[in-house]
Image (cartoon, grey):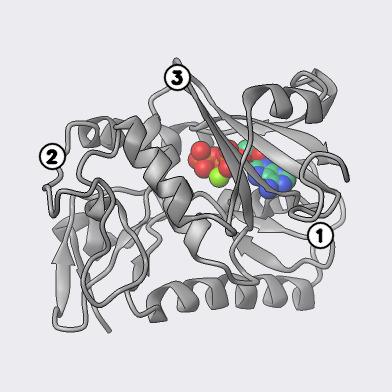
Amino acid sequence: MPSKKKSQWKTLVLGCFKDKNLTLESPKLVSKKQGSSRISLSDLSDYSSPSVISDLSNSLVGNVQIFTCKELKEITNNFNKSNFLGEGGFGKVYKGFIDDKLRPALVPPQPVAVKALNLDGKQGHREWLAEVLFLGQLKHRNLVNLIGYCYEDEHRLLVYEYMERGSLEEKLFKGYLATLPWLTRIKIALGAAKGLAFLHEEEKPVIYRDVKASNILLDADFVAKLSDFGLAIDGPDKDQTHITTRVMGTHGYAAPEYINTGIIVDF
Ligand SMILES: Nc1ncnc2c1ncn2[C@@H]1O[C@H](COP(=O)(O)OP(=O)(O)OP(=O)(O)O)[C@@H](O)[C@H]1O
Ligand SMILES: [Mg+2]
């Protein structure tokens, strides 16, 4: 598993994305594309504007909670080392616990995973926003549930349901003595495939672009859930046969024909 090399390729390409110019489609900062109810990144006239975020929070109301940095500090015991779960290209991930007083009646008491953007890293606001937009609107048993987010000054955090068994990568490759039984492997593969099928079959399809073992999280019953939507994009519309994109993904995982052409076809 090329763990160091893989993130290098991803972040190298992501750096190019930060200058992307998005078109102003209407005087409103957040608009919906005709014929679809899901808001996507390209619907935002200026995705770094604070007013876009506040419009967005109105649109996502009921789907995701907005947390303050102070609240997330409290639930992770001040981002304590003992709560540390791991680290990826976006930043560090900590375990936290939402009790019955934090969002009574809105979020049931539960353990969560809090991912904090590394302000010195290669990823940034755009990747954070993509995650909020996709996972804030797409809900499925095989996608990790985004419970909420925090947007304060330069801080960007994400709050997910806690996945007891961590990532598939850890189960397969990282000092896990007992091998996964074949039935469990099939269950995981099926779960991940159902998550992808859900994305592809949406009215406005989503291309995930980052399928790999570290992005497949496992709950206590080995139900697989796709996580990390920072690279996801909208797929071809009904009247399109394909889209052409800047090639993004993780070295060793992306399909060779996509790497060669940048073309994603509609099957
Ligand atoms: N919802 C979650 N519940 C439990 N653990 C999680 C959760 N999300 C992430 N983790 C753990 O945090 C660690 C880092 O995850 P993260 O998704 O940030 O990076 P990654 O997938 O390892 O790398 P990359 O940046 O290439 O996607 C992983 O070990 C993962 O198991
Ligand atoms: Mg990941």
Asked if ligand 1 lies within 8 A of label 2, the reply is no
Whole-number angstrom distance, CA of label 3 to CA of label 2: 21 Å
Q: How many marks can you see?
A: 3
Image quadrant where residue 193 sits: bottom right
Is residue 151 visible in the rendered image? The answer is yes
Element under disc 2: loop
Image quadrant where residue 45 sits: top left
Element under disc 3: loop
Residue 67 sits above or below residue 69 on the image: below
Q: Mark 2 sits on what residue?
A: 21
- Give, as a three-letter code, the residue at label 1: Thr
Q: Mark 1 sits on what residue?
A: 179
Nearer to the camera, 38 or 267: 38
Asked if ligand 1 lies within 8 A of label 1, the reply is no
- Image point 78% across, 36% down: which residue? 95
Tell me if label 1 and label 3 are in contact, CB under 8 Å: no
Q: Where residue 259 appears, x then y in whole percent?
A: 23, 55
Is residue 250 visible in the rendered image? The answer is no
Whole-number angstrom distance, CA of label 1 to CA of label 3: 42 Å
- Image point 27% across, 84% down: which residue? 267
Which quadrant holds the N terminus?
top right
Q: Residues within 10 Å of mark 3 (few under 14, many from 20)?
A: few
Asked if ligand 1 lies within 8 A of label 3, the reply is no
Q: Mark 3 sits on what residue?
A: 154
